[in-house]
Image (tube, rainbow, N blue to C red):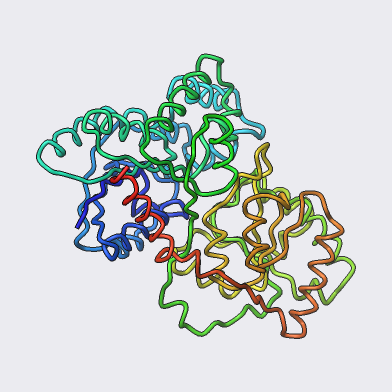
C-alpha cells in the first residue's frame, strides 16, 4: 500500500466544518490503496472543539505532531471572560465592526508580521521533525491543506529536500481572501504573501482546489492548472434513521454565524411577514445552532425577531446533522465580501445530504449557487432581493402548512466523501507518475 503524508493543522478534536475534509478523505484512502500518515499541531488553538469527532478517527491511523508557539493564545488573553476558543472567536467577529484601537492594532500586527499566518512558528519545528522522520521512513506523496497556509510552506521545504511528489490543497484562496484586506497590509507584506503563494503553486506537483472560482483565479493570475475536488458529506447511519420534521416553520442555520453573513434582508422580510400574518407568526421559528456573532444578534433584535429565535450553543457534529434533517428550511448565507463568488462552505454539502430545502442568500452565479441549482436543492436569492425572499418564504410556508414542504434534490451522490476520495486518489496516482 502506498503512503501519503498529510499535513493539516485541523484534526480532531477540532470541531466545525473545516476539519471534515481531510478526516473523511483519510478514512477512505486505505480502501483505495493509500495509507494516510497525519501530521498536525500538538497544541493547536481551535475556535471550536468537538471531542466526539475523536471517535471517527480510525484506531490504526498513524499520527505525528509537534508543539509550536501559538500567538492566538495571546490574543485570547485580551478577553477576561469565556474560554480561549470563544475569546478568539469574539475577536474574529469584531475584525471589521466597531473594533477597538487595540484590537485593530493586533490585527495589523498579525497581518504584517505573521506571514503567511499566525501559525508561522509551526513551520521550522515541523520541518525539523519531519526531516528526522523521513530520513528513516519512506512516503510516496505529500498533501498539504490550507488555510493555514503555513502547512504549505512545511510541505514545500520537504518537497525541495526529498523531491517527494506534493499536492497543495486550497480550501480557501490565499492573497484574495477577504480577511487580508481587514489587516491593513503594507505593500511589502502583500508582496511577500504573493511571492509565497506563487512559489507554493509553481512548485507543487499538482494543485487541488475546492471550487471553480479559485481554479479560475489561479489560472488567470499564475497560469496554474488545478484540479477541483469539492468538499462533501460523510454517509452515516443517520441516513437510515427516521426523520421527524420540526413542527414549527423552522429556518435553521448550523455552524458559526459570522457578522459578514448577517442576513439583514431576510430579517427585514420576516419582521414584515410576522406583522402581516398571525398564522406565519405562530408558525415561525429561527433556529441558530452554534456561535452567533453579537452583530447578528443585534440585527435580529432590531427587527424584533429575538422572540422567534432559538439559540442553541455548539453541539457535536452528529447532532448538528440531525437538526439539519429536521429543518423546514436550511439557511445558507454567503459571506458579504468582495469575492463572494468564491465562498463554497463545506456546510453546503451537509445540507445537500440532509435533503431539506436550502435557502441560499448570495451571488446567483457563485460557486455555491451553481451546485444548489444543478442539484435542484433549493432557492438562490441575490443580496438585496427582498421581493424574491418574500415570494420564496410565502411559497415554502404554504407548503409547510399543507405538509408538502419537500426537497426533491438530484445527483448528490457525487458529493459523498467515498466518491470524492476517488478523485483524490486519481490525483495522487497522477502525481507519483508525473
- Specify the farthest residue to the right: 276
Q: Please state, as top left, top right, bottom left or bottom right, where the C terminus lies in the image.
A: top left
**138 on left or right of 399:** left
- Residue ID at (80%, 78%): 398
Question: Which image quarter: residue 26?
Answer: bottom left
Q: Position of residue 302 (x, y in %)?
A: 78, 50
Q: Position of residue 118 (x, y in %)?
A: 41, 30
Query: For residue 178, what is the image quadrant?
Result: top right
Q: Nearer the viewer, residue 401 or 412?
A: 412
Coordinates of residue 431 in the picture (x, y in percent): 33, 45
Name above or below for residue 113 compared with residue 322: above
How far across and how far down the image is residue 393, in percent?
79, 68
Q: Is residue 415 left or right of residue 43?
A: right
Residue at screen point 35% across, 57% down: 23
Residue at the outermost left position: 136
Left or right: residue 256 versus residue 170 is: right
For residue 186, above or below residue 124: above
**Which residue shows up at 22% across the image and 46% down it?**
140
Front residue of 30/10: it is 30
Q: Dividing the image into 4 quarters, which one contains the N terminus?
A: bottom left
Amino acid at each position: 500500500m502506498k503512503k501519503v503524508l498529510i499535513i493539516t493543522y485541523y484534526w480532531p478534536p477540532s470541531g466545525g466544518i473545516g476539519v471534515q475534509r481531510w478526516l473523511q478523505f483519510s478514512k477512505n484512502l486505505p480502501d483505495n490503496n493509500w495509507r494516510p500518515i497525519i501530521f498536525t499541531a500538538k497544541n493547536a488553538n481551535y475556535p471550536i472543539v468537538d471531542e466526539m469527532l475523536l471517535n471517527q478517527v480510525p484506531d490504526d491511523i498513524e499520527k505525528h505532531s509537534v508543539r509550536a508557539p501559538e500567538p492566538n493564545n495571546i490574543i485570547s488573553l485580551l478577553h477576561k471572560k469565556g474560554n480561549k476558543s470563544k475569546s478568539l472567536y469574539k475577536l474574529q467577529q469584531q475584525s471589521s465592526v466597531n473594533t477597538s484601537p487595540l484590537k485593530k492594532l493586533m490585527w495589523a500586527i498579525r497581518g504584517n508580521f505573521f506571514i503567511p499566518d499566525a501559525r508561522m512558528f509551526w513551520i521550522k519545528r515541523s520541518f525539523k521533525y519531519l526531516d528526522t522522520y523521513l530520513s528513516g521512513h519512506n512516503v510516496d506523496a505529500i498533501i498539504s491543506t490550507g488555510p493555514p497556509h503555513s502547512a504549505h510552506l512545511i510541505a514545500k521545504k520537504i518537497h525541495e529536500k526529498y523531491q517527494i511528489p506534493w499536492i497543495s490543497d486550497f480550501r480557501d484562496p490565499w492573497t484574495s481572501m477577504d480577511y487580508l484586506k481587514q489587516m491593513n497590509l503594507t505593500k511589502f507584506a502583500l508582496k511577500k504573501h504573493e511571492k509565497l503563494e506563487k512559489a507554493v503553486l509553481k512548485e507543487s506537483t499538482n494543485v487541488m482546489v475546492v471550487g471553480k472560482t479559485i481554479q479560475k483565479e489561479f489560472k488567470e493570475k499564475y497560469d496554474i492548472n488545478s484540479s477541483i475536488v469539492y468538499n462533501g458529506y460523510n454517509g452515516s447511519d443517520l441516513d437510515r434513521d427516521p426523520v421527524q420534521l420540526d413542527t414549527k416553520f423552522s429556518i435553521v442555520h448550523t455552524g458559526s454565524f459570522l457578522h459578514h453573513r448577517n442576513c439583514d434582508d431576510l430579517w427585514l422580510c420576516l419582521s414584515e411577514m410576522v406583522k402581516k400574518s398571525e398564522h406565519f407568526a405562530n408558525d415561525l421559528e429561527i433556529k441558530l445552532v452554534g456561535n452567533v456573532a453579537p452583530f447578528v444578534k443585534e440585527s435580529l433584535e432590531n427587527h424584533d425577531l429575538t422572540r422567534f429565535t432559538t439559540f442553541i450553543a455548539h453541539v457535536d457534529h452528529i447532532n448538528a446533522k440531525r437538526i439539519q434533517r429536521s429543518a423546514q428550511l436550511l439557511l445558507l448565507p454567503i459571506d458579504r465580501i468582495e469575492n463572494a463568488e468564491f465562498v463554497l462552505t463545506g456546510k453546503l454539502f451537509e445540507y445537500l445530504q440532509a435533503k431539506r430545502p436550502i435557502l441560499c442568500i448570495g451571488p446567483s452565479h457563485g460557486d455555491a449557487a451553481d451546485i444548489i441549482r444543478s442539484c435542484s436543492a433549493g432557492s438562490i436569492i441575490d443580496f438585496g432581493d427582498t421581493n424574491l425572499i418574500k415570494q420564496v418564504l410565502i411559497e415554502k410556508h404554504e407548503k409547510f402548512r399543507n405538509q408538502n414542504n419537500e426537497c426533491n434534490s438530484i445527483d448528490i451522490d457525487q458529493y459523498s466523501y467515498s466518491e470524492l476520495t476517488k478523485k483524490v486518489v486519481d490525483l495522487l496516482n497522477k502525481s507519483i507518475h508525473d
